[in-house]
Amino acid sequence: MTDLAFPNASTLDTLSDVTRGPSRLTGALSRVGMAGIELPVVLDDTAFDVRANAGVSLDDEHARGIHMSRLYLGLDALTRRPLTLARLRETLEGFLESHEGLSDTAYLDLTGTPLLRRPALISDHSGWKGYPLTLKTRRSPKGFEAQLELEIGYSSTCPCSAALARQLIQRRFDEEFGCESEPNLTFEAVRAWLGDEDGIVATPHSQRSRAHLRLRLDPEQTQLPWREVIERTEAALGTALQTAVKRVDEQAFALANGQNLMFCEDAARRLHDTLITQPGVSGFQVDITHMESLHAHDAVATAQWHWPGSL
């Protein structure tokens, strides 16, 4: 038996490439490529791993297939410098240049979870918090399009349960300090009662909640406004989820919840009013989910502005 030698650069031109031949089956395809490619990227100064889905259209209905290795090499080059919209556009244009005559549309989606270090509300504690992120980009005869998706967690306290809890506390106060039972009511007595578990007999319910943002980005800008969107969203809601805390932070968080009572409709409207003024965003859809602690189902709301649909 004769041992076969591994191919080398000098034999490259002699290797068969069946993708260059015609297909027995004909028909144009809207998207062909690869999914789930693992890549390290840097966004601003934040490094994290993403899964990439990359592809192009196959418009030549007689062509057997595309050149997937050319897409992979383009993605590898994307990892060598910080990620920007301009670099994503260049990558898609490279996809098309390497498939000239075969494709007129290129796609690239990146999904990962960058971690940001977040300070506690009062103390000097801090910790890492993840913000699931997806970037969807497309280069077609219509031009370059980009969408940014972010998932941001927060706490929401139900306004209805807060009102019902206050009513029960008032009723308990009447029972304890009614005129007939306590004619000489003092400030000290009321203050002590307010700090007693027997006095505050009811508390409102709250739940971990989620805002899923889908943002259409202005194709003329070069940078990705992901951090600014996170900061403005958390500020608008007022009850961002915390990491490492001390008791003073927990008390501050309770105060923030009490000052930001929200139905899912309230949260959706807050973010609508915030994102409509966000520089670099030309349309959006906001999906709000309050994972109920009272019910076994979720409460949801959606707000849109100039939203054409997902890429």
Image (cartoon, rainbow, N blue to C red):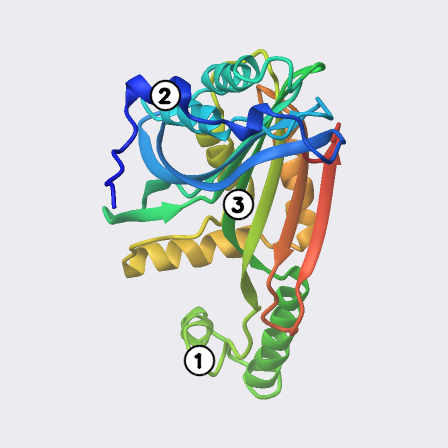
Crowd class of label 3 (few under 14; some 14 to 19; many from 20; radius 10 Å): some
Of residues 297 and 133, the one nearer the viewer is 133
Of residues 229 and 253, the one nearer the viewer is 229
Q: Spot the residue most to the front.
A: 1
Q: Which residue is mark 3?
A: 151
Of circles 1 and 3, which is in front?
A: 3
Q: Which residue is mark 2?
A: 12
Q: CA distance from mark 3 to mark 2?
A: 46 Å
In which quadrant will I find the C terminus? top right
Q: Earlier in the sequence, mark 3 or mark 2?
A: 2
The amino acid pointed to by label 2 is: Leu
Q: Secondary structure at mark 1?
A: loop
Compared with 53, 69 (above or below) is: above
**The image quarter in which residue 254 lies:** bottom left
Q: Secondary structure at mark 3?
A: strand
Q: Position of residue 82 (x, y in %)?
A: 35, 22
Crowd class of label 2 (few under 14; some 14 to 19; many from 20; radius 10 Å): few
Disc ID at residue 197: 1
**Residue sitting at 40 percent across and 24 percent down?**
73
**Residue sitting at 57 percent across and 18 percent down?**
99
Q: CA distance from mark 1 to mark 3?
A: 37 Å
Visible in this render: residue 181? Answer: yes
Crowd class of label 1 (few under 14; some 14 to 19; many from 20; radius 10 Å): few
**The image quarter in which residue 165 lies:** bottom right
Q: CA distance from mark 1 to mark 2?
A: 81 Å
**Residue sitting at 63 percent across and 77 percent down?**
168
Compared with 250, 17 (above or below) is: above
